[in-house]
Image: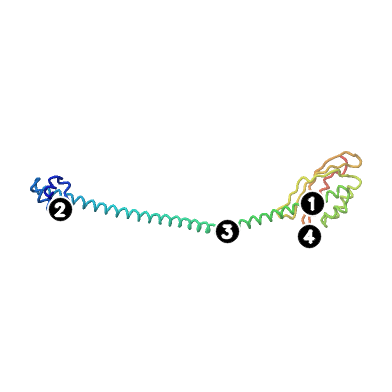
Amino acid sequence: MDVCSEIAETGLTEISLESSDRKSYCLSNSRGSMEVFQAKIRVKHAVRRHSSEAEALFQLQLGNFRRFGEIMEKDEKARSLNLTLFAILLFLLSSVSCTPLLIGQAAYQGMGIVAVAASMEDSDKLKDSVKAFNEAFRYEDYEKASVCVSPDEKEKFWSEVDRFTGKIRIAEYELRDMQPDEKKNHATAIVHFQYWRTESLVLKTVSITQKWQCSEKDKAWRVSDSGFAAFPSNSH
């Protein structure tokens, strides 16, 4: 079958582009106008050309998207690494900046603990001295009690001993309160006594205030005023 017969049998849509010139000639003789046929051939060329350009553009855009994705992935990893490094740096800086504060706070607390411990130690010494003095006086061990008396109060103390001896007996005593002054070298103690007089044998009570002083020399607490003058001098 020649070219013209092929065109006549298949129609315009099956025409091969390589033999377009020859088929165009035959078509002008067998089917319609040569101009119509050539127009359709140009359309096919344009469609194929545009399709190729569109495919190429699509592949180009696809490649760009892939490269963009890779760049974004790298940037994301970089940002994650930068954030991690920044967090570590911030932690180290905060630790370093807080260290002097923590040391200062610990030192302040340590000083507070030392001060409290020293205050408690002084309080314990005062309490022991008050109890030792009144315990010895209760059992009429006046020599032992005199050790707790300030040197300049010894004479007054022994006068009180003379007033008690054979006349007043102490049954019990209770230390109810102690109050050191601000300088921590003077204090007062409130002591409650149960006692009786030998001539009446009636149990009585009295509360007295004793004054105490801490020696600067040996840091020992000694009574400066026993308060025993508050005991009534007779049974009334």
Of labels 2 and 4, earlier in sequence is 2
Q: What separation in Å lies between label 2 and label 3 (alpha carbons)?
A: 91 Å
Check whether the beta carbons of the residues at disc 1 and disc 3 lie within 8 A of each other.
no
Element at label 2:
helix
Of labels 2 and 3, earlier in sequence is 2
Q: Nearer the viewer, mark 2 or mark 4?
A: 2
Mark 1 lies on residue: 128
Of labels 4 and 1, earlier in sequence is 1
Q: Nearer the viewer, mark 4 or mark 1?
A: 1
Residue 12, position as x, y percentages in the image: 15, 46
User: In this picture, is 125 found above or below 204?
Assistant: below
Residue type at numbered disc 3? Thr
Of labels 1 and 3, earlier in sequence is 3
Locate residue 103 relative to residue 219 in the image: left or right: left
Residue 221, position as x, y percentages in the image: 78, 55
Residue type at numbered disc 1? Asp
Mark 3 lies on residue: 99
Q: What separation in Å lies between label 1 and label 3 (alpha carbons)?
A: 43 Å
Mark 4 lies on residue: 218
Element at label 1:
helix
Q: Nearer the viewer, mark 1 or mark 2?
A: 2
Numbered marks: total: 4
Residue type at numbered disc 4? Asp
Check whether the beta carbons of the residues at disc 1 and disc 2 lie within 8 A of each other.
no
Of labels 3 and 4, earlier in sequence is 3
Residue 19's disc is: 2
Q: Quadrant of the C terminus?
A: top right
